[in-house]
């Protein structure tokens, strides 16, 4: 797999790098610059691929991280503990799938939870393309909701 070629920062005809420019004039030569042509700059000087991976890691951690209590379930494994381990990646959607469990089998519910979690992550990735501020806000909201969901899941597990 080949690495992406480095992306050159947008520059003025005089050669001045326009990354992070907030005014419509080049500070070097004074030429008028179209900020739309410059395009958005990525936080921390990330390449698009690294920005994607950073967003993915942050959102996946916020979404699934609060359910990490499941890994503390030590052996000997019992059947209900194994079920909760299988359910771990889909736990962010546990509350939404509780009514579904009365209608369909556990395996279909698990698949619905997995697919729902992947779709939710894709939607969140799309929202956070707007920048670092959006990533921070969305990650904090997701972390709060996932923590609440994990608290409920733990209470259901203990019952």
Image (cartoon, rainbow, N blue to C red):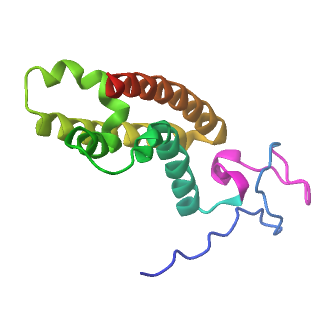
Name of the residue lying farthest toward the bottom: 2
Asked whether 28 falls inside the magenta stretch, the response is yes
Q: Main secondary structure of the magenta part?
A: loop
Which of these two is toward me, 157 or 135? 157
Task: Indicate left or right for 85 with 28 as reference.
Answer: left
Res 118 visible: no
Asked whether 116 falls inside the magenta stretch, the response is no
- Residue 31 % position (x, y): 84, 54
Task: Indicate left or right for 109 with 48 as reference.
Answer: left
Instruction: Report the residue at 11% width, 20% height from top.
Output: 102
- Residue 137 % position (x, y): 61, 30
Res 77 visible: yes
Which of these two is toward me, 125 or 141? 141
Write down the quadrant of residue 64 in the picture.
top left
54 lies above or below 7: above
Instruction: Report the residue at 47% width, 22% height from top.
Output: 148
Circle count: 0
Instruction: Report the residue at 80% width, 43% height from top.
Output: 22
Name of the residue lying farthest toward the front: 76
Rendered-image quadrant of the N terminus: bottom left
Rendered-image quadrant of the C terminus: top left
Task: Indicate left or right for 29 with 53 as reference.
Answer: right
- Residue 61 % position (x, y): 51, 45
Instruction: Report the residue at 67% width, 69% height from top.
Output: 8
Q: Magenta segment range?
A: 24-44
Name of the residue lying farthest toward the left: 104
Task: Indicate left or right for 77 with 33 as reference.
Answer: left
Which of these two is toward me, 36 or 1? 1
Write down the quadrant of residue 139 in the picture.
top right
């Amino acid at each position: 797999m080949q690495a992406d070629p480095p992306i050159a920062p947008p520059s003025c005809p005089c050669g001045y790098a326009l990354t992070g420019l907030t005014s419509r004039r080049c500070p070097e030569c004074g030429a008028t610059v179209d900020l739309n042509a410059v395009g958005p700059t990525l936080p921390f000087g990330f390449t698009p691929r690294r920005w994607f991976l950073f967003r993915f890691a942050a959102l996946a951690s916020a979404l699934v991280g609060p359910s990490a209590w499941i890994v503390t379930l030590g052996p000997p494994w019992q059947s209900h503990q194994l079920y909760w381990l299988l359910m771990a990646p889909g736990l962010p959607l546990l509350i939404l799938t509780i009514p579904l469990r009365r209608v369909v089998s556990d395996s279909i519910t698990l698949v619905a939870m997995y697919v729902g979690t992947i779709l939710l992550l894709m939607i969140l990735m799309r929202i956070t393309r707007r920048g670092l501020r959006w990533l921070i806000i969305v990650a904090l909201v997701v972390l709060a909701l996932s923590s609440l969901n994990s608290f409920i899941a733990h209470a259901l597990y203990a019952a």
